[in-house]
Image (spheres, rainbow, N blue to C red):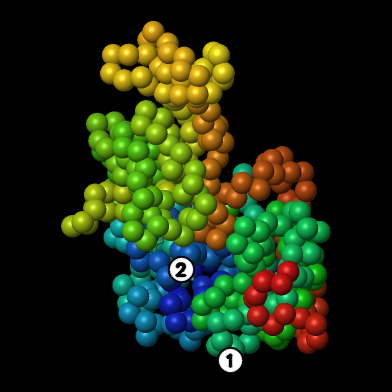
Amino acid sequence: MQETWHIGIDDTDSESGMCTTYLATLLVDLLLTFPVEFLDFPNLIRLNPNIPFKTRGNGAISISFIASEEIVEDIWKKTVELVKLNADINDPKTDPGLIIIKGEVPFAFQEIYQQAIYTVIPLKRVKTLLEKHPNKHFSIKDGRGLIGATAAIGADLLSDYTYEFIAYRDLNQRKSERLIDPKSVLIADKKIPLTFNNYDYEHKKVMITPHGPDPVFCGIRGETSSAVIRMWELIKILEPIRTVMIFRTNQHTQVHFPKKYVGQDLLPHLSVKVRGIVVKKPKDFPGGHVIFTIKSGNTSVDCAAYEPTKHFRKIVRELIEGDEVLVFGGVRPASAKNPVTINLEEIKIIRLISLKERITPKCPICEASLTSAGKDQGLKCKKCSYKSPEKLYYFQQRSRKIRTGVRYVIPVCAQRHLTKPVSRNIPLQFHLSSETDFQQAFYAFLKRRSELNSHPVTSKNILAKNDQSNL
Ligand code: ATP
């Protein structure tokens, strides 16, 4: 009998290699050797970006398909083998978790997802859940990956979602530099507005290529699968590609701030939004960090814009005592040196206090500047000797450089996977009106996949390095 199945995987990679998305790509290839019907693109689910156990972007994977009960045992065995073979288990921090469930996703899984995007979920809670619900699961070492695997199955990408096209490089290719023509990325970026975060115009940097030892050559993010494919076709590359995959994902949807917190409730590693009044104005610290303090509830909390947040710090420096703000970020626990601090990702200004500055009037006779004539005396003009009987200062409203209601977000180069870029102001109805048949769109991609794998490698007239100094 045909049934619906959901597989969840997490924690297979380490800082020295591998990538859970690559393992998911291998799993799609494995599933393609069976008579299964995929229901969607593989889902790449980002979870709380402030989790200390994460390797890079705290991503987990789920894959949903229809298959007969008889072949699923074989699929399961081969999936376990695949994880054993490919997970970087020699790394002490890699704790793979793999789950398969049948039928409707239980509400308890959805709850785990809803909380895993911004809180810290105890492993024991997930293991207890897995004992209660019919499923098969497999884990290595502590099996911490079961948390992400459960959350990925429980994720729903119904309201907002995006796509990421990932190209994987030859596995022998260990150099951190990805050979791509930055100019082609710039040109394609302008041609395909339904993609985003391709290029950091402020720092003149290609943003689609990572720098680590992982197998990812590039990741192209966009609103539709056709947009990310088109972008891939337009960019020029200088190294062979092993394979490609498209994921549907919660990346760039800002789901990680579902709840408003007050200062006294800030637990370590939560992703929070907190409303408060600035009680200590921003101060610069060595290393380029800018820190200010807000009062929220009955507690004062430090908020930090670190050096990598670049020009965002200029915005932060404009705050003054009395301003009311909504800050978004991750809770860094208190240390011996520092109190609990919110590592800022975004600020919205709710109310700006009006700033008045003292103005000294001009000389009514010759219009030169007046200065004080001394204590308890008026103002005097050095040019024409005019003297006023008293100090006729007046106060004028000073304009503030920051505005209420605007989203001030850290720059692309410092953003988390879940951060919603300011440029991504596509209304939700866009998603409702096009490409919502994910199954059909995924099969359309699979049909073209081998052609997309063999992306022509350009060898001439290309800037080999990711160096845009002469663009
Ligand atoms: P990559 O992005 O390259 O796949 P990663 O950054 O996702 O790597 P992992 O190696 O998957 O990092 O490690 C993250 C670990 O944290 C996983 O074991 C996952 O189950 C666990 N985890 C994820 N979210 C939470 C959460 N909210 N609470 C507790 N544990 C979590």
- Judge from the rendering whether residue 278 lies leftward or rightward of residue 165; answer left or right: left
Tally the marks.
2
Image quarter in which the C terminus is found: bottom right
Residue 6, label in figure: none
- Judge from the rendering whether residue 460 lies leftward or rightward of residue 126; answer left or right: right
- The structure residue drawn at horizontal position 53% and vertical position 43%, both measured from the top left corner, is 408
Residue ranking furthest to the left: 336
Residue 126, x across and y down, in percent: 35, 59
Image quarter in which the N terminus is found: bottom right
Residue 56, label in figure: 2
- Against 132, residue 207 (above or below) is below
- Judge from the rendering whether residue 426 lies leftward or rightward of residue 150; answer left or right: right
Is the residue marked 1 within 8 Å of ligand 1, measured from its CB? no
- The answer to whether any part of residue 302 appears in the image is yes
Task: Determine whether the residue tagged by mark 2 lies in a helix, strand or loop.
Answer: loop
> For this rendering, which residue is in front, 37 or 56?
56
Task: Determine whether the residue tagged by mark 1 lies in a helix, strand or loop.
Answer: loop
Q: Name which residue type carries label 2.
A: Arg
Q: Of label 2 and label 1, which has the lower sequence position? A: 2
Residue ranking furthest to the front: 384
Is the residue marked 2 within 8 Å of ligand 1, measured from its CB? yes
Q: Quadrant of ligand 1?
A: bottom left
- The structure residue drawn at horizontal position 46% and vertical position 49%, both measured from the top left corner, is 313
- The structure residue drawn at horizontal position 33% and vertical position 54%, both measured from the top left corner, is 285
Mark 1 crowd level (few <14, some 14–19, many ≥20, 10 Å Cα): few
Q: Name which residue type carries label 1.
A: Asn
- Against 341, residue 319 (above or below) is above
> For this rendering, which residue is in front, 159 or 206?
206
Residue 172, label in figure: 1
In 3D space, how far apart are the residues under numbered discs 2 and 1 (Cα atoms)?
21 Å
